Each structure stands twice: as C-alpha cells, then as structure tokens.
Amino acid sequence: MALLFEISVPSVAIRNRPERFPVNRIYCVGRNYAAHAREMGSNPERESPFFFSKPANAVAENNIVMPYPSRTADLHHEVELVVALAGEPLSAKGENLSLAEAATAIFGYTVGIDFTRRDLQAEAKDKARPWDTAKGFDNSAPMSALTPVAEAGDIGEAQITLKVNGVQRQHGAINDLIWSIPELIAELSTFYKLQPGDLIFTGTPAGVAAVVTGDVLVGEVDNLEALSISIGPRA
Ligand code: MN
C-alpha cells in the first residue's frame, strides 16, 4: 500500500560494516548507577531505576557539531552505554524475556549521550509533568557506531568515561549498573514487546553537568568506538 509521503527511517552506523542498524525505539533507564541517583537527590536503596523513552529520530551521528538546543539554558550531558537489540528471541517472542533470552537478544553496544534540558526536567518534576521536552528533542541521542557483541569483549568489565574539553567529568564501571544489562532488558520486556531495532540507554554514572557552546565532549567505553560531539551555537 502506498504511503501518503515518504519519511526517513532513523539508523545508526555499525563498525566495519556497510549496513546501518535501523532504529525502532529508544528506551532509557533513569538512575541506574547509585552515585548518580544520589547526585539527583534520590536514595538508590529505596527507589528502583525506571524507564522513559525518546523518539527514534532523536539519534544523531558521531562527530557532529550539535546546535545548542532551543528552550533551555541548562543543557546537561549524560554519557551512557547503549545496547542495541536484534535477533531470534525478539522475532519469536519479545515479551517477558528470561535473563538468558535477554542476553541473546543483544546485537551490540555503543557509546551514547542522553542529552537533557535539565531546567525543563526540573520544572517537569516539580509540576509532576512528563519529561518529553526535557529528554526527547532533536539530536538528544547521539551515538557512535555500534560494535557487535562478538567484537565488544567483556562489556561487564568495561569502564565508561566522559571528558569535556579534555577534562574528565564522568566515570563509572559497567559492573556498577544497579540493573545489569540482561536484567533491564528482561524488565523492559514486561512493559513492551521488544523488537529488532530497539535501543536502550542503560543509565549514566555520576558527574552530570552543563555544557556550553564551544565544548567538545568525548564519551568512551572500553573496546567500543569513542563518541565525539561538539556543541555549536543555537540554531
Ligand atoms: Mn540518562
């Protein structure tokens, strides 16, 4: 059946491959590192991580100059390990995945930044409103090229860092995730039927802070392609 008009399918590069990974949905996990939960004013002993989402077309390419977004004066970086889902457990099922099924649904990993309009998020929290305008704007989910699982080494042993203008701002260990990668995929699959092309931002370590025009951000996870984003002037 013909479509009324064409739209482009958002996609992410794959390291050393000509094909790109089509993006279906982008899920994000809030407060999945204890130290970051504390810096945001919550108690990780009492409050579990939780999910929110961004639109698929929030993805952005590595090495771009990202215009400083509209309607904020407090743009924050949150460096995160991103998990890309594809494969047999999803086409066969997708819901209520076991931890073993969750593990085999992982296509690969990459480094992303969950850019956040922190001022709008604070206002949304204050007024008990949704986070969409704080989290789901254009270019709010840049990421480097995906590394397939078989080439990513032991991701549980990896360190994650973010440098701004060469100075380290964020650091964590993937082992410090409150919900491990299979746990968060299994948990997410109790809310949604997961599909090939789904991406999951797995949470950010402590050290989130504001960026300004001219800043250069470099996010790294061991064995994955580094992500480099420059902040440009407002569009
Ligand atoms: Mn985040």
Image (tube, grey):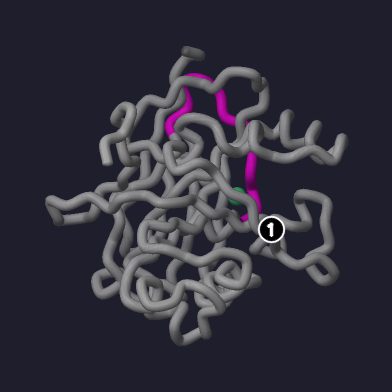
Q: Is residue 176 visible?
A: no
Foreground residue, 93 or 226?
93
Q: Quadrant of the N terminus?
A: top left
Residue 44 image-quadrant placement: bottom right
The residue that mark 1 highlights is: 31
Residue at the image position 85 percent from the left and 41 percent from the top? 128
Residue 232 vertical position relative to residue 164 in the rendered view, above or below: above
Q: Is residue 205 visible?
A: yes
Residue at the image position 44 percent from the left and 43 percent from the top? 56
Q: Secondary structure at mark 1?
A: loop
Q: Position of residue 98 (x, y in %)?
A: 52, 85
Q: What secondary structure predominates along the stretch shown in magenta? A: loop
Which residue range is magenta in the image? Answer: 205-216
Residue at the image position 44 percent from the left and 83 percent from the top? 101
Residue 153 vertical position relative to residue 83 in the rendered view, above or below: below
Residue 27 vertical position relative to residue 133 in the rendered view, above or below: below
Residue 131 in magenta?
no
Q: Is residue 165 left or right of residue 130?
A: left
Q: Is mark 1 within 8 Å of ligand 1?
A: no
What amino acid is at disc 1?
A: Arg
Q: Dot 1, crowdedness within 10 Å: few (<14), some or many (≥20)? A: many
Q: Is residue 21 left or right of residue 228?
A: left
Q: Is residue 216 left or right of residue 52?
A: left
